[in-house]
Amino acid sequence: MPVEFSSFPANWRLPLYWVEVDPSMAGTFTLAPPALLVGHKFAGGTAESNVPVAVGDRNTPQGLFGIGSMLERMVQRFFDNNGGQILWCLPIDEPAAGQAATGSITVATPPTDAGTLSLYIAGQLVQVAIGATDTTELVAANIVAAINDLDTLPVTAALHDSSSSQIDLTCRWKGSTGNDIDLRDSYRGSLGGEKLPPGLSLTYPAGNKLSGGTGVPDFTTAIANLGDELYEYVAVPFTDTTSLSAWQTEYGFSSSGRWGWMRQLYGQLYAAKRDTYSNLLVWYAAQNFPECVMAIEPAAPTPIWEWTAAFTGEAAIAFTNDPARPLQTLQLIGCLPAPKHQRFNTGQLNGLASTGAATQQANANNVPQIMRETTMYRLNLYGAPDDAYTDMTTLATLARLLRNQRSAVTSKFPRYKLADDGTRFGPGQAIVTPSIIKAELVAEYALDEFNGLVEDAKVFARNLIVERDSTNPNRVNVLYPPNLIGQLRIFAVLAQFRLLGAQQTQS
């Protein structure tokens, strides 16, 4: 019986015992897919712009990207939700031609009694001691000092003039993302021990947000620098048309995209978008790509980049464990939901999910949790409704299946000869036929079914086609028809009760 060696030469003459080690039949496919956070760094950060850098703890990003930078805060929120993932960050410079978002808080009336001001900026608490006899100017000066003492904030503060009760706030980077910075006080209310001291009142800009930020980053160099390295779970908190186009091209299905046949890298994009219900419906209706963008209420204090990082962290750990399980009820730790009376209601959440929005809702402990990881893909190439990629579980499961299959084929048939079915060759020959390949794919599918990724193995085996190419004798063509396992998302009950009369109930 011939045994084919890969490296031990057939003409070797020296005795006696020689071993060629072959691991192809022993190993099992293992993968630790990394996550990637994309965000702005400060100019003083030591990390090279547009070049991915690995981050393994909460402290390192402070020096790499700058304390309080968008990317540093994203890392903190990611680790709140996922402490075990391999994490890379892609630091991006602020847009050179952009403008920083600005806004002001005015101390409208002075306090009549002492207390504590609980001010929230971008979801972070800033506490200011208020004296009973403080003037509006003194309160404003104390607010400025408290803000500038907290270096994790995304803003700087200054008095409008030397004798003013107006505090001018400026985002610490240029760009339209600064318009998402939320300003409010006493978020947790009196039950949470937060209320304005008697007499004190503050006025905020329209919508309680900074405004006037302009400019979006250029991702050309940053995306090119990713090369063909694997970045599976990618947080990109930029939802302008230019940024979406760049990242959706990189993670697209064309030949040059990560889901295309040439690269086979796969991966998932995550983001968040804040707006009113009606505006979000219009925005999502204009999108059509399998990216998860979570809808956020206007009154939620946490900024979009932190929502994005938390969402990505939860998705990464869940899909790494099991890509076919839904993400519903997973908590987004560190994100503050909108006040109860300003949240999307159930009907609105359903409308958003129907339009392609990933959705969230606060649970009984007032912690936001994922409702559904819906993607923005809705239409096929002809503009007809298409649910092929409605949920991110589809992409996650497909990526796992294709990687499993690739591992099996490349480990078992790395240097094989190809013959037609029925060819009479000796045992041990490194020869494979279409039927042998088909049997291997069926066995791999059975293992995937056992692991809860697919179903209907018998139907799969009937529909699987493996054939030798009619014009290229060195090529095998495969029609691979997996039936992806579903998810329990809706439990519908028709409660058809009865009211029986007295005569019917008598024995």
Image (cartoon, rainbow, N blue to C red):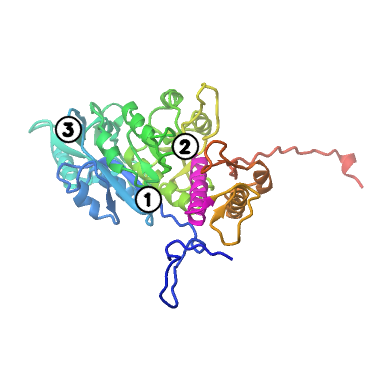
Single out the mark in the foreground, 1 or 2: 1
Structural crowding at the residue carrying mark 3, measured as other residues with C-alpha within 10 Å and reported as few (<14), some (14–19) or many (≥20): some
Camera-side residue of 294 and 454: 454
Q: In this view, does 165 lie to the left or right of 376?
A: left
| Magenta stretch: dominant secondary structure | helix
Residue assigned mark 2: 359
Farthest right residue?
507
Farthest left residue?
162
- The type of residue carrying mark 3 is Asp
Q: Quadrant of residue 117?
A: top left
Camera-side residue of 247 and 366: 247
Q: In which quarter of the image is the N terminus?
A: bottom right
- Work out whether mark 1 precedes mark 3 in sequence or the reverse, and give the earlier one: 1
Residue positioned 33% across, 51% down in the render: 87
Single out the mark in the foreground, 3 or 2: 2
Residue assigned mark 1: 34
* Residue 341 in picture, x, y percent from top left: 44, 34
In three-dimensional space, the C-alpha distance between marks 3 and 2, rounded to whole angstroms, equals 34 Å
| Whether residue 48 can be seen here | yes
* Residue 188 in picture, x, y percent from top left: 36, 43
Structural crowding at the residue carrying mark 1, measured as other residues with C-alpha within 10 Å and reported as few (<14), some (14–19) or many (≥20): some
- The type of residue carrying mark 2 is Thr
| Whether residue 119 can be seen here | no
- Work out whether mark 1 precedes mark 2 in sequence or the reverse, and give the earlier one: 1
Residue positioned 71% across, 38% down in the render: 495
Which secondary structure lies at badge 1?
Answer: loop
- Work out whether mark 3 precedes mark 2 in sequence or the reverse, and give the earlier one: 3
Residue assigned mark 3: 168
Which secondary structure lies at badge 3?
Answer: strand
In three-dimensional space, the C-alpha distance between marks 1 and 2, rounded to whole angstroms, equals 24 Å
